[in-house]
Amino acid sequence: ILSRVDQLKVCIRDVLANDHFKSSQIILRQTTTVASTVDEQKYRETLTWISPIDFPAQQSDLIANRQIGTGPWFVNAPEFTNWMEGEKQTLFCPGDPGTGKTMLAATAIDHLRSYAPKNGEGLAYIFCDYKRHESQTAKELLSALLKQLLQGKSGYAPIRELLESFRKNNETKSFRLQFSEIVDATQLVVQTLGKAYIVIDALDECADINSARTDLIKCIVDLQTRTNLNFLVTSRFIPEVQRHFYGHAVLKIRASDDDKRCFIAGNFGRLPNVVQRNPDIKTAIQDSILRATDGMFLLARLHMDSLMDKTTKKSLRQALESLPKGSKALDQAYDATVARIDAQLPEHKAQARKVLSWITYARRPLAPLELCHALAVEADSSELDEDNLPDIEDMVSVCAGLVTVDEGSNIVRLVHYTTQEYLERIRGTWLPDAQCEIASTCLTYLSYQCFRDGPTCEYKQAMQRQTDHPFLRYTA
């Protein structure tokens, strides 16, 4: 019996020891997971501290909206291939308005994303925007490039040490990095990686206010002399931009017929059933739009939109015969779009004008919820009636293809910079009171009963107030 008891004691001790070992392993794994989660959170906070700008979200929006099969000519061009495979290379890609420069820049970035990380190389990019002049300083844009170059690169010891120093700065200082610190950090990262690619789209939309554009280009060119950095830029043909790239490789951007055919074929499904059931009509549409667009992708889109309400073969043929052509084709296409908007039901017409007024004259891009709240404000009201909030998809629909929503970036915008320019040109006849109405709406909103007590000094209350009133940050 005693021998049996001893055997049982040994078994119990072994079981307890084994359970303890398993428990220790579980605790260790959970502790490691918690520590890893905390480190990852600090890492994300540090990157946001470096720059709050999220260009990768915009890239995702562009790729999501790209017509499959478009753009291979650009990344297969000898000029692009030589640029990508070379060292310290600069490629300037100019193009007329509406030729698809931004989408081709996104295509190039997507191509580089499948190539650069495999070789341990860096990739960063900027999408300049005429609506973001205040945030498009050389410092802010270079910070955004540095943030992207750091993402996913903490495995390199010098970069890990750099991130750790940034994290400590973030925790102990309220101010962000100085410009010289950003330049030095960017140089260190590129030198550590061995090679990096920088792509800047629509450089012409980065205003040279306080030499922002000039300083950014100078900084990148200086970095290129000290590191293995390849630099690609898209822009309109503007002398102030072109002068920075004399002597460098040039790849002119122009919408290819293959890309336009692919786009048109991919959008037949948006047209009435009479098109779906008639191959001859499809061929006629494709041929007519190709002849009318002359290297402009935007025109192909506007022409396709102009056919959406044509429900008979006769009306389609008449529309195709009258498609605008020549140097003034873009303005004529916009004229036709505005005419379609004005031909809608009175309420839809009025709503479209309000939407386009806000997007055109807002001081910065608006989020969908901000725009909906702006449109819901009623004159002389003392509070917002949530039953008056419109649906964002309805708002986009009444604008006849001139407005789109970038879901990743969470902004509502015009389809192209030329749309903004056109609407500003016809402001006197089509949107004469736009800025007055915007100012009145903002003042009405700020006068609501819920804000009568004035500002709050409590951080949590301030954050909750902005959550409850999405339009407050813009109006204030």
Image (cartoon, helix red, strand yellow):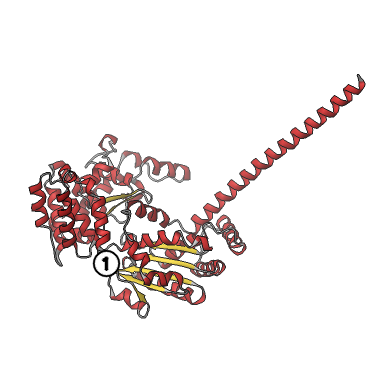
In this orientation, which residue lies closer to the viewer: 18 or 242? 18
Coordinates of residue 413 in the picture (x, y in percent): 29, 53
Residue occupied by mark 1: 254
Coordinates of residue 429 in the picture (x, y in percent): 12, 56
Vertical position of residue 466 compared to residue 218: above or below: above
Q: Is residue 219 left or right of residue 93?
A: right
Q: Is residue 279 left or right of residue 203?
A: left
Dot 1 crowding, Cα within 10 Å, few <14, some 14–19, many 20+: many
Coordinates of residue 451 in the picture (x, y in percent): 35, 42
Q: Is residue 412 left or right of residue 42?
A: left
Q: Secondary structure at mark 1?
A: loop
In this orientation, which residue lies closer to the viewer: 141 or 361? 141
Under mark 1, the amino acid is: Arg
In this orientation, which residue lies closer to the viewer: 129 or 135? 129
Q: Residue at x 24, y 62 (%)?
A: 257
Evaluate whether residue 458 shows in this view. Answer: no
